[in-house]
Amino acid sequence: MQSSFYPIGTPGVPWGEAEITAWRARQQRQRSYADEVLAAIDRLRDRYDVVQYGQLDYAPDIYPLFALRSRGWQDGRPVALVTGGVHGYETSGVHGALRFADRDAADYAGRLDLLIVPCVSPWGYERIHRWNPRALDPNRSFRPDSPAPESAALMALVAPIADRVRVHIDLHETTDTDETEFRPALAARDGQPFTPGSIPDGFYLVDDVDAPQPGFQDAVIRAVSAVTHIAPADAHGEIIGSPVVAPGVIRYALRSLGLCAGLTDAPYRTTTEVYPDSPRTTPALCNEAQATAVRAALDYVLGQ
């Protein structure tokens, strides 16, 4: 656990441009968006319409943004939206979405139109970071006039079909680095003290406090529990500081917090969270849990 102040900035003083530049200089590419994500999307081109919905110009790097759209798209058909990699470091969100697209999506042909966006934040994916290069969290930036280009591009993609989106499942994960890097960096950036917390050991969901769907959330939890373990409540009956309202389920104000899952008014929405650093699971099981969560969400909605 980090006990000293984050190595950039002055305690109690929010970052300015100099601190953001210093932070960005510390971020090194650790994996390849082209090799690990774009290559996987290319292998799916014979089954999907691959749509480029934007491009991020973070000189010297340029990142094309792609979505997978069902073949035979019909304007009157309900849409299922699957998003991953809003936080680029959350690996299973990206590869869980790709696994679902490769293995499972054909089972829903003709029943739902699928829009799958596997990696919303490729700069963060390559650097295994939560933020974009402007030290902004895309998952707090889904709001009008978004300051995060990743979020703005996804909002523009979804806007024309937002009223058709019946279900949106946003795939995330929590790692040990939330406590050792990301939350300390957030506190330093905002000029706030860092208060250590804990990482939930297992899978859980974030429902919408303003439009809860307990049956929907429960269906996803039950399906995923056959793949990996569900995070228990802590001693206070909470997960990450929020009351547990059902096994493995908490609630956030999705829209007002600018979260990706609040992007539309879809009646069925959830954010998944898995914990790949747990000794009780593996990265492969986390990918499987994410794909299973998508299937369970779609099956529940079709059953309604």
Image (cartoon, grey):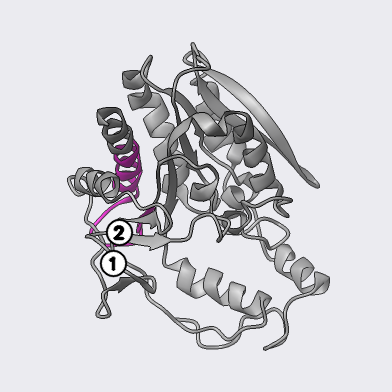
In the rendered view, does 84 fall on the left or right side of 102? right
Give how far across and how far down residue 186 sits, in percent: 60, 72
Q: Are marks 2 and 1 in contact (CB under 8 Å)?
A: yes
- The amino acid sitting under disc 1 is Val
Q: Quadrant of the C terminus?
A: top left
- Give the residue displayed 30% in from the left and 28% down from the top: 302
Percent position of residue 67, x then y: 57, 29
- Mark 2 — residue? 249
Closer to us: 132 or 149: 149
Q: Nearer the viewer, residue 242 or 48?
A: 242
> Is residue 153 toward the left or the right of residue 173 in the image?
right
Q: Quadrant of the N terminus?
A: bottom left
Task: Give the SS element for disc 2.
Answer: strand
- Check residue 288 for magenta coloring: yes
- The amino acid type of the residue labelled 2 equals Val
**Residue that appears at 73% across and 85% down:** 13
98, above or below 24, in the image? above
**Crowd rating for badge 2 (residues with CA inside 10 Å; few <14, some 14–19, many 20+):** many
Q: Of 126 and 99, which appears nearest the observer? A: 99
Quarter of the view holding residue 51: top right
Which range is magenta? Answer: 272-294
- Tell me the residue that label 1 is attached to: 244
Name which residue lies at 52% across and 46% down: 85
State the image quarter where residue 297 is shown.
Answer: top left
185 sits left or right of 214 in the view: right
Whole-number angstrom distance, CA of label 2 to CA of label 1: 6 Å
Instruction: Look at the numbered disc 1 and give the secondary structure of its residue.
Output: loop
Q: Please tell me which of labels 2 and 1 falls first in the chain.
A: 1
